[in-house]
Amino acid sequence: MEQKILLVDDEKDIVDLMEEVLIQEGFQSIRKAYTGTEALELCHEFQPDVIVLDIMLPDLDGLEVCKKIRDFSYCSILFLSSKNDDVDKILGLSCGGDDYVTKPFSPKEVVFRIKAQLRRQQYQVAAPIKEEDSILSAGPLSINKESCRAYKNGQEISLTGREFLLLSYLVENADKIISKERLYEQVWGEYSSICDNTIMVHIRHLREKIEDTPSSPQQLITVKGLGYKLKKRAD
């Protein structure tokens, strides 16, 4: 397979085992890192499609590494952690992660999740975007689906890959009430038991970037008991 995978964990046995299973599944382009600093250097150089990232690293923790990666890459990030707590999962997803697996884990499960991330990436680029359809807008917000950039009043907004997908879906369905379950299905591509928390965290971060007063949103509003609505015109 052509897709590039970066494995990051300070436990060499785990990294080697993951590499072995990935090779068995047909992946050929795999790199390994054992510290956060090394992971950042390799991410710049290697430009992976998916990163499997341990949270507990000896220098920078995985959450900090993820935040730094999101400054320059939309690649999928799958966290590994020995902590099985919803708070830790929410922290991982809110800082830009796409999935979360707790240790001990089945290497086959991680490979399945990697493949799921790669499939979603392929779906996003499978259908060619017509020039006239590449830019959508709602009030002061506009998105360019071709360049994956978002703007507010003409000024570019810095979004993570997941935030961009979330905003894109909301803009495409402006003035419609979208349930949390529907958002998760469309943006994450699967059901999760932490769906509510995941959506709430990402909506909060999105509001911080698109609303003039995030604590009193005028455009991305909550419809109690039903979900969220992005207004074409802010109040």
Image: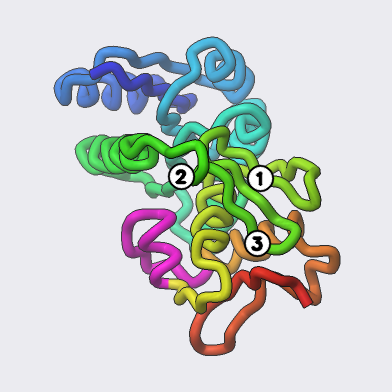
Which of marks 1 and 2 precedes in the sequence?
2
Question: Does residue 32 sit above or below 128 in this rendering?
Answer: above
Q: Image point 65% across, 72% down: which residue?
A: 231
Which of marks 3 and 2 precedes in the sequence?
2
Q: Where does residue 166 sit, x and y in percent of width and height?
A: 53, 56
Residue at the disc numbered 3: 138
Q: Nearer the viewer, residue 205 or 37?
A: 205
Instruction: Please state which of the two labelled residues, at mark 2 or mark 1, is closer to the viewer.
Output: 1
Specify whether 198 is left or right of 69: left
Gap between marks 1 and 3, in whole Å? Answer: 11 Å
Structural crowding at the residue carrying mark 2, measured as other residues with C-alpha within 10 Å and reported as few (<14), some (14–19) or many (≥20): many
Structural crowding at the residue carrying mark 1, measured as other residues with C-alpha within 10 Å and reported as few (<14), some (14–19) or many (≥20): many
Badge 1 amino acid? Ala
Q: Which residues are drawn in magenta? A: 181-198
Q: Nearer the viewer, residue 231 or 78?
A: 231
Q: Secondary structure at mark 3?
A: strand
Residue at the disc numbered 1: 150
Q: Where does residue 105 sit, x and y in percent of width and height?
A: 29, 44
